[in-house]
Image (spheres, coloured by chain):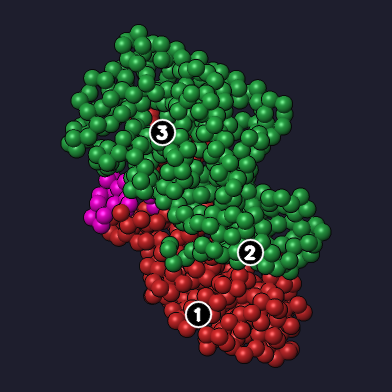
Chain colours: A green, B red
């Protein structure tokens, strides 16, 4: 990996080898600052989701800008970031493999570690592991607020789980995980808001029900880049978990604000940098970024800043770009906005940070492939 | 990477940590032997495509079973495999970045290196680099036989390229690259055959035209797992480039033979091994293999050996499995057949080789992420 870097610090952008991930550092820093200002103004906590970037460098920048810590989705991802200097990590997911529960409990000796649960036996297994390591783990009960994925039903079903955590030896009941993942990319503003309004009322009822049992929720966590202003203004959620705002992908560019315009508070800062590698046809060009350079689950990449050409198809190592006016030339470089940043980032070993047309930093994708 | 292995040699399959890539070694070896027998019987050469597996271990097994060498799609991929012991590599693609042309020429000091071209200036650049390194590179002219991607038109357009190569200082004109990538996954047998019949006649005409100019094609290369029997029986192609046959993915499982049955000469040998990580709902289960565990460009993964459940959706770290009879249990493990093996393999650092329910080998995905 380290011998196969696409550039060195100081390399001119034009000379960066492709395909690779380029970060426009100015846009990226503005995104971080905009979110930080919002969180500060609202008196909320941001626990930025590191599943987007998997980078210790970026996590530490977010923390330096006020984030209380990060979320990870996997224990191995959390380990990589703790090894990179992060000291406060929520695994915003269930951990059920016995070996990984062991690693979670061990990691809690080195950092503040939180985790989500939706099963009673799983709580016992995590408690037993923490006891073996003499560690303390904070636990959130995950409720399903409409995504239809993990989590128990809101309300009564959360009570026995919270009570079991509170009555355990080494765990602390820390609150609720209530992320509405399905709502994030809903295009229509009213529809997106309605989904979160529903989530908020479910969370609110669950917090209330737990309080009746003497179980206070210090943390009520959720929200993503598509909906965070709804959760942020709810007076119910107090810890937001946005991730994509640092980069913004093509799919987030498709969701609409109240007035029908594209969401514009964050900028595209992450690009797949690519080169035209074959130009034998007048009406199209072939570039070097295909399926191994992006995840196409939310559509193929979009050419940035050009409306005369279009990325129309991908095979393993090739992208097809329609070029109706025959403008592209062999060797020409283009910036593509990934359709979906998180699984795209997970393919690459390096971020190439660029400012003023020159490489300023090379950041490893610290937790790349850390899926255990 | 090496600290995050999903298993150790000797681990029981049930104890392998998920998600990870598991190879059924028996099925895998049968696939390799079946292709080797065909190639031998037909008197052809196999240059197995390593873009599928990116593994030096697997490349060397293919060579031990008669393959003359491997294809790679990228110079960095070729470097990784040469470092892993492979001594004969065709970069079955164009190389246009000056830095990567340099690396290609340098690599040709260590191994037999071949490359494809479809541009005159590119030939000069490769020749100049080879001169600097005192290396010799064999060059194939790529013709577009219907895929509509790289390559010049068949026939006359190949002549000036072949002549330029033949007249260069350090390059050798080795023949034609004529891969019909678009035909490989065509479901219908007759349609697939028709596409390759067209390709064969284009290749044949081009070989003839070059011969008139005194330019002999030692290598006439192409074919993939979906169509290789057509090219293999053509008496025009002499070097086949099949890759997916070692693993077979769900999409190859959908193409039909002449009698309408699914292709059955190769077996599924590669699986995404996954665990049910949340089971709070009667009618579905959530597993730990989502978009970061697979490429969904050819559809989501398919549960292997079970028709009572179905993998129906993926988010970043979660897969949704419909479970109409509520049979799945928390912690249960499943094997998934990837929709498309090549870009799925490119996400993982390790292959876990399994025989008789026990891990027999851990093979690094040697050229993972080597996209330069």
Mark 2 — on which chain does it sit? A
Residue B332 in sight here: no
Labels 3 and 2 within one chain: yes
Task: Compute the Cα span from label 3 to label 1.
Answer: 49 Å
Q: Image quarter for residue A105?
A: top left
Q: Which of marks 3 and 2 is nearer the N terminus?
A: 2
Q: What element carries label 2?
A: helix
Quadrant of the image containing the C terminus of chain A: top left
Q: Which residue is drawn at 44% across and 79% down?
A: B87
Mark 3 — on which chain does it sit? A
Q: Are dots 3 and 1 in contact, CB under 8 Å? A: no
Judge whether residue B9 is colored magenta. yes
Q: Main secondary structure of the magenta part?
A: loop
- Residue linked to disc 2: A14
Task: Compute the Cα span from label 1 to label 2.
Answer: 23 Å
Local crowd size for mark 3, using a 10 Å CA cut-off: few (<14), some (14–19), many (≥20): some
Task: Compute the Cα span from label 3 to label 2.
Answer: 37 Å
The mark found on residue B106 in the picture is 1
Q: What stretch is highlighted in magenta?
A: B4-21
Q: Where is residue B299 in the image (x, y as percent from the top left)?
A: 55, 46
Q: Which residue is drawn at 70% across and 91% down?
A: B214
- Residue linked to disc 3: A68
């Amino acid at each position: 990996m380290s011998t196969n870097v696409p550039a060195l610090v100081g390399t001119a952008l034009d000379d960066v080898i492709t395909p690779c991930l380029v970060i426009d550092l100015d846009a990226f820093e503005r995104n971080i600052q905009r979110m930080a200002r919002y969180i500060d103004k609202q008196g909320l906590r941001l626990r930025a989701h590191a599943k987007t970037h998997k980078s210790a460098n970026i996590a530490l920048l977010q923390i330096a800008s006020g984030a209380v810590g990060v979320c990870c989705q996997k224990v191995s991802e959390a380990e990589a970031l703790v090894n990179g200097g992060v000291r406060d990590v929520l695994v915003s997911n269930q951990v059920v493999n016995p070996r990984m529960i062991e690693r979670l409990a061990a990691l809690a000796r080195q950092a503040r570690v939180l985790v989500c649960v939706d099963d009673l036996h799983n709580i016992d297994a995590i408690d037993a592991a923490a006891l073996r390591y003499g560690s303390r783990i904070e636990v959130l009960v995950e409720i399903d607020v409409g995504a239809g994925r993990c989590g128990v039903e809101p309300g009564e079903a959360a009570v026995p789980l919270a009570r079991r955590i509170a009555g355990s030896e080494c765990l602390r009941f820390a609150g609720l995980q209530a992320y509405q993942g399905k709502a994030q990319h809903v295009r229509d503003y009213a529809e997106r808001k309605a989904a979160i309004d529903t989530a908020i009322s479910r969370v609110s009822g669950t917090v209330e029900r737990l309080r009746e049992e003497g179980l206070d929720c210090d943390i009520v966590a959720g929200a993503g880049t598509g909906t965070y202003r709804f959760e942020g203004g709810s007076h119910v959620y107090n810890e937001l978990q946005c991730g994509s705002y640092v980069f913004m992908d093509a799919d987030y560019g498709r969701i609409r604000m109240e007035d029908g315009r594209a969401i514009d508070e964050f900028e595209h800062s992450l690009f797949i940098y690519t080169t035209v590698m074959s130009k034998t046809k007048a009406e199209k060009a072939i570039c070097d970024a295909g399926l191994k350079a992006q995840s196409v689950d939310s559509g193929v990449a979009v050419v940035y800043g050009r409306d005369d050409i279009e990325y129309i198809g991908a095979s393993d190592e090739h992208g097809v770009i329609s070029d109706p006016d025959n403008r592209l030339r062999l060797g020409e470089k283009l910036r593509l906005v990934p359709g979906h940043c998180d699984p795209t980032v997970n393919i690459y070993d390096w971020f190439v940070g660029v400012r003023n047309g020159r490489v300023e930093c090379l950041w490893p994708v610290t937790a790349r492939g850390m899926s255990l």
